[in-house]
Amino acid sequence: MTDAAWYAARGAGVVSLALLTIVMVLGIGSRSGRPVFGLPRFGASLVHRNASLIAVVLIAIHVLSLLADPYAQLRLVDVIVPFDAAYRTAWVGFGTAALDLIVALVVTSLLRRRIGQRAWRAIHWLAYAAWPVAWLHGIGAGTDRSSGWYLAVAVISVIVVVAAVVWRCSDTFGTVGGRRMERRVNDAIAAAQRPPPTTYPGRTR
């Protein structure tokens, strides 16, 4: 049982990190108003949502497996309260903090209509904090942290996310969508300022 829990925790943790990276990049890219990795905007949003759901399921498997593994020495309170675990306190604490942030994102997404778009968007910015904290947890607490294949996954994830964030902060981000929206706004303003036609019997001036 211990070996099964250990392998389940390892596998779910690594795959969830990869999925969170995809979610992060697609979430940023979908804001640009242009296709992301060849996907149209609705396709990117669909993959983003499904990847998020799968990542949440894998994170749950990761946590439950660690609770069942006596070597991890993880208590139920350690899943909620960060930086109090007996095993690698700081690194496990990062994982707990990431879990708390992700739970906040999931709950507010389910309550999106009730809390309003503005509040949901403000809380959704926590995704930018959840990803690096989860990455730190994986690189510090994972038993595969010294393996070449895991280091490759971790480094590639950082490169991809950093590139997406740099693109998000650049002047070229959203140029296509921004110009299209600007044209629509200008057309709407021009239509509103245009005087209505004066109609006479038999003709229009």
Image: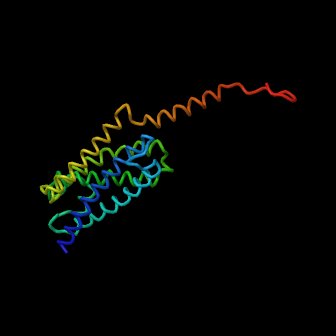
Pick the front one: 110 or 200: 200
| Relative image position of residue 24 (x, y in whole percent) | 34, 48
The answer, for residue 165, to whether it is visible in the render is: yes
Q: Does residue 129 appear left or right of residue 27 in this picture?
A: left
Pick the front one: 39 or 123: 39
| Relative image position of residue 18 (x, y in whole percent) | 28, 55
Pick the front one: 57 or 164: 164
| Relative image position of residue 145 (x, y in whole percent) | 15, 55
Instruction: Report the residue at 60% width, 28% height from top.
Output: 189
Rendered view: 14 above or below 174: below
Q: Quadrant of residue 9?
A: bottom left
Instruction: Report the residue at 30% width, 48% height from top.
Output: 130
Looking at the picture, the colour scheme in use is: rainbow
Instruction: Report the residue at 40% width, 49% height from top.
Output: 38
Q: Residue furthest left?
A: 146
Instruction: Report the residue at 46% width, 53% height from top.
Output: 111
The answer, for residue 86, to whether it is visible in the render is: no
Q: Quadrant of residue 87?
A: bottom left
Rendered view: 201 above or below 111: above
Q: Quadrant of the N terminus?
A: bottom left
Q: Does residue 143 appear left or right of residue 108 in this picture?
A: left
| Relative image position of residue 131 (x, y in whole percent) | 29, 48
Q: Residue furthest front?
A: 38
